């Protein structure tokens, strides 16, 4: 088996890269270089702006948007081992190299907002078993939840993540905008949001579903629809239909 990865160079210092730098440094993994477009004011990290400045024969972790991954990997010196952090990019579509892998943390990252990575699931894939073992061992130093996942599985996880994170957060935004425009306070919904999340810690989302669509309450649904317009009305109608079909309550309406 190959030696453990003790030093990491990172390409990208955005939402994901900045959190991983902090996690590695807090857990005894040396961050050698961080490649950025322009030098930040933080001088405690060895930032570089030229990809050729990455250490020879080193391990490089690519933390850039999906549409940049292929170009960046193709530019990294060929004697470096490389992994990337995407949930949606298959290894098979990327430039070939001896050691290529995936180091995917299934979490939402926002630069500047602290996050404990110890419970974040990391999904690992590589083009050879030795490198896969190295990546798994590296992930285990910052997370208690490390699993192997092929590209197809990772893509499915990413789809589900978009539903529970991106779409849910957008619905929070829609609700917030709706209330603000009517001089009402979104903060009054936060205990409800907390309770919704608390329930699914121990129960299936299917079992804890509530609301007018779940009950088949046509009068309430119609009253709600009269208060909505445009995309808000479309979203309400579509999600109501999905819930009705799930619980077979559409035949009551």
Image (spheres, rainbow, N blue to C red):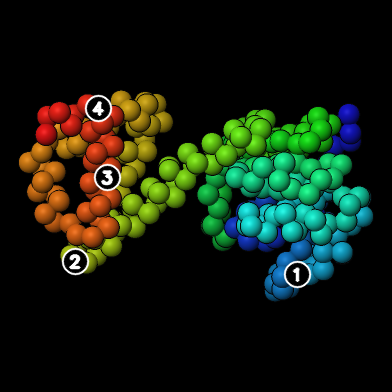
Distance between mark 1 and mark 4 Cα atoms: 56 Å
Decide which of tag 2 and tag 3 comes sooner along the chain: 2
Decide which of tag 1 and tag 2 comes sooner along the chain: 1
Q: Position of residue 117 (x, y in %)?
A: 60, 43
Between disc 4 and disc 3, the foreground one is 3
On screen, 228 above or below 237?
A: below
Q: Which mark is residue 167?
A: none
Decide which of tag 4 and tag 2 comes sooner along the chain: 2
On screen, 92 above or below 46?
A: above
Between disc 2 and disc 3, the foreground one is 3
> Which quadrant of the structure image shows residue 125?
top right
Between disc 3 and disc 1, the foreground one is 3
Which quarter of the rendered picture does the C terminus lie within? Answer: top left
Q: Regarding mark 4 in the picture, which secondary structure is present there?
A: helix
Q: Which mark is residue 247?
A: 4
The residue at the point 59 percent across, 33 percent down is: 153
Which quarter of the rendered picture does the N terminus lie within? Answer: top right
> Is mark 4 in CB contact (under 8 Å) with mark 3?
no
> Which quadrant of the structure image shows residue 46?
bottom right
Q: Position of residue 191 (x, y in %)?
A: 29, 46
For disc 1, the marked residue is 43
Distance between mark 4 and mark 3 Cα atoms: 15 Å
Distance between mark 2 and mark 3 Cα atoms: 26 Å
The residue at the point 81 percent across, 45 percent down is: 96
Decide which of tag 4 and tag 3 comes sooner along the chain: 3
For disc 2, the marked residue is 183
> Is mark 1 in CB contact (under 8 Å) with mark 4?
no
Distance between mark 3 and mark 1 Cα atoms: 50 Å
């Amino acid at each position: 088996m190959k030696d453990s990865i003790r030093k990491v160079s990172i390409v990208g210092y955005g939402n994901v890269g900045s959190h991983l730098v902090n996690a590695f440094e807090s857990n005894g993994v040396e961050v050698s270089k961080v490649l950025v477009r322009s030098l930040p004011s933080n001088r405690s990290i060895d930032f570089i702006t030229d990809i050729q400045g990455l250490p020879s024969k080193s391990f490089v972790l690519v933390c850039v948007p999906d549409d940049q991954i292929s170009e960046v990997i193709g530019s990294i010196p060929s004697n470096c081992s490389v992994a990337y952090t995407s949930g949606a990019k298959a290894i098979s579509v990327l430039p070939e190299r001896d050691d290529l892998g995936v180091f995917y943390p299934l979490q939402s990252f926002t630069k500047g907002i602290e996050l404990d990575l110890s419970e974040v699931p990391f999904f690992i894939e590589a083009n050879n078993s030795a490198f896969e073992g190295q990546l798994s061992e590296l992930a285990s130093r910052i997370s208690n939840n490390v699993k192997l996942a092929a590209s197809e599985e990772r893509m499915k996880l990413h789809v589900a993540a978009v539903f529970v994170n991106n779409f849910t957060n957008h619905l929070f935004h829609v609700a917030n905008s709706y209330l603000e425009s009517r001089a009402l306070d979104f903060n009054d919904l936060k205990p409800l949001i907390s309770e919704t999340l608390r329930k699914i810690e121990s129960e299936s989302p299917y079992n804890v579903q509530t609301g007018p669509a779940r009950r088949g309450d046509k009068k309430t649904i119609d009253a709600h629809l009269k208060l909505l317009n445009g995309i808000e009305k479309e979203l309400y109608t579509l999600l109501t239909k999905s819930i009705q079909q799930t619980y077979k309550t559409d035949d009551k309406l």
